[in-house]
Structure formats: structure tokens, C-alpha cells
Amino acid sequence: MAAVRIRLSLRGCTNRPFYHLVVANSKWKRDGKHLEQVGCYDPMPNANKELVVGLNLERIKYWLSVGATPTVSVYKLLGLAGVLPAHPRLVLEASRKREAAQHIKDKPLELDPPSENNSPIESVDAHDTT
């Protein structure tokens, strides 16, 4: 028997993705038929810079209890929702972004006026034929 997966099914239109969280056989097409829709996810931020996620936690917990396995992207969403423990990759990405933001914040902005030694434009004598 093939494995049952909880995964994202792409909906929406060009340049405006929208996903349904579906429970499907792992051999079925990504956007094909599914056993049940258990949530939705809009990756485009709304006016308040928020990502919208709707989950039917009761059904997700049921499918996890009967052996359905979530994909990595769904695992991250469920980890953020508190259904599953946080995915290790999610923790690593968050710490890297935090360090990069701190590095940019601590680095002072340096603007040096151009001097004769490091001038970006070199003067060229048009009459010099050597």
C-alpha cells in the first residue's frame, strides 16, 4: 500500500499562488485528486504583512495518528502552528536570518569621498600616443 502524505496543492493564478493542505496518496499528482482538504495557506502577505494559514487541527491530528506523513513544507507550517515540534531546518534558517540582520544593524554605513588615489574614473589624455 502506498503512503499517505499531507502536502500542499497549488491553486491560484499566475504570480498569485494559493495552496490547499490536502491528504493524498503519495503516488497521486500534486494538484490531482486527494482524500481530504485539511487547510489552506496563502504565502502572499496581506495588508498587515501577515501570512494567512487556516488549519483543521482535529483532522490533521487524526491523519497524523493513522500514519500520514507531512512534507517538509507542511511540517514547517505545522511546527509554527504548534501541532508538531519545530523543524530543525526552520530553526537553522531563523538563526541565520537573525545573525544577518544583527550584522547589518551593527555595521556602520561608510561613505568615503572619492580621492585622487582611488578615483573610479581615470583621466585619459586623448593626445597621448605612447
Image (cartoon, rainbow, N blue to C red):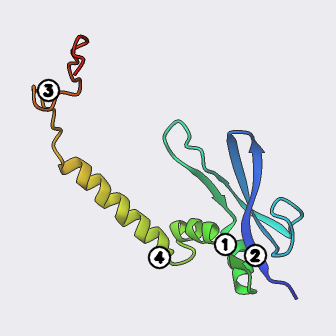
Q: Quadrant of the N terminus?
A: bottom right
Residue at left 21%, top 23%? 122
Near mark 1 (Cα within 10 A), the count class, few <14, some 14-19 or many ≥20, is few
User: Looking at numbered disc 3 in the image, what kind of residue is underneath it?
Assistant: Pro
Q: SS of the residue at dot 3?
A: loop
Residue at left 41%, top 70%? 92
What residue occupies the far top of the structure in this picture? 127
Residue at left 71%, top 61%? 39
**From the viewer's perspective, is 111 left or right of 38?**
left
Q: Nearer the viewer, residue 12 or 55?
A: 12
Numbered badge on residue 114 = 3
Q: Earlier in the sequence, mark 3 or mark 4?
A: 4
User: Relative to 20, does residue 121 appear above or below in the rendering?
Assistant: above
Where residue 42 sits: x, y (%)?
Answer: 64, 49
Q: Earlier in the sequence, mark 2 or mark 4?
A: 2
Q: SS of the residue at dot 1?
A: loop
Total numbered labels placed on residues in the image: 4
